[in-house]
Image: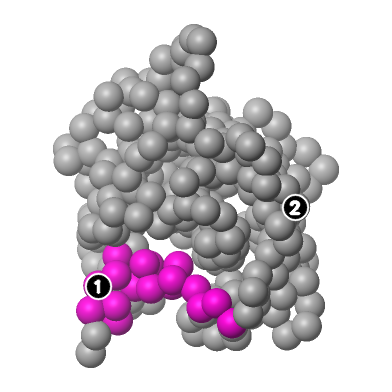
Amino acid sequence: MSDSETDPAARLVGLLDIEQIEVNIFRGRSPQEALQRVFGGQVAGQALVAAGRTTDGERPVHSLHAYFLRPGRPGVPIVYQVERVRDGRSFTTRRVTAVQQGRTIFNLTASFHRPEEGGFEHQLPPRLEAPDPESLPTVADEIREHLGELPEQWERMARRQPFDIRYVDRLRWEPDEVTGAEPRSAVWMKAVGPLGDDQLIHTCALTYASDMTLLDAVRIPVEPLWGPRGFDMASLDHAMWFHRPFRADEWFLYDQESPIATGGRGLARGRIYDREGNLLVSVVQEGLFRSLEP
């Protein structure tokens, strides 16, 4: 069995290593998973790789804006078609369309910026002082503590999970624990193994991770994050701004909040910091929430 099949980090790098099948056309694998739809972070990460591979590689991405149009089918390859919108002196723009079985499932526009010196810098400080990630239990440990053991399905997922995720606040398990809870969540994250030195891979890996917990902030005032769900949930759109270089295999703090949920949709905002409190990435996402009750 190859390392990419047993090592979740290597598996993530392999998943992002999409195949070029023609000029401006790429094909990405979509693993057969026990999920109803392809994970949105996977599609976003692969699309950004496709966009980046049509640039000169000297301009890092500074922003992306994406729409999830249809659910992707696990196990079916996804074709990424790249349109070279602009190659300017300072900025490069790419538009990517993801197609599966002849249907468009995802659109992404990414902008790349030639590094340059600015006349000034500032940032707001982090909202919270989070404990060190090493002092916090893993999600799997919290589940084992609550249930006594990890259910077989979650055990398989934990073994394949490419990111170590540790919630700053302990998980809520009972409905009465969410009463009065603010729509905020924060997690420490990092890839479970080294991802190499290609900055594009680190950017796309963090794009993958950014879709994993962001909508938690919408759900927190309504239901426990773990256990039976009362809502079907799906990402609608996703936007990211990359402020500073980073490594996705080093700890980063993902601070998340939901300013509003109404009309079946919830908005979530995220800020990603390194351990020194430097703001690395800003994220905004809207999700669809529909009650599972008949």
Q: Which residue is the site of mark 2?
A: 85
Q: Residue at x 56, y 55 (%)?
A: 55
Q: Which residue is the site of mark 1?
A: 7
Q: Amino acid at mark 1?
A: Asp
The question of residue 14 being in magenta is answered with yes
Q: From the image, state whether disc 1 or disc 2 is nearer to you.
A: 2
Q: Residue 292's image quarter? A: bottom right
Q: Residue at x 23, y 59 (%)?
A: 193
Residue, far left: 135
Whole-percent x and y of residue 275? 27, 30
- Residue 145 badge: none
Q: Residue at x 63, y 37 (%)?
A: 89
Q: Could you tell me how far apart the alpha carbons at marks 1 and 2 are, in whole angstroms? A: 37 Å
In the rendered image, the vertical position of residue 248 relative to residue 107, given as above or below: above
Magenta segment range?
3-21
Query: Relative to 128, is 55 on the left or the right?
Result: right
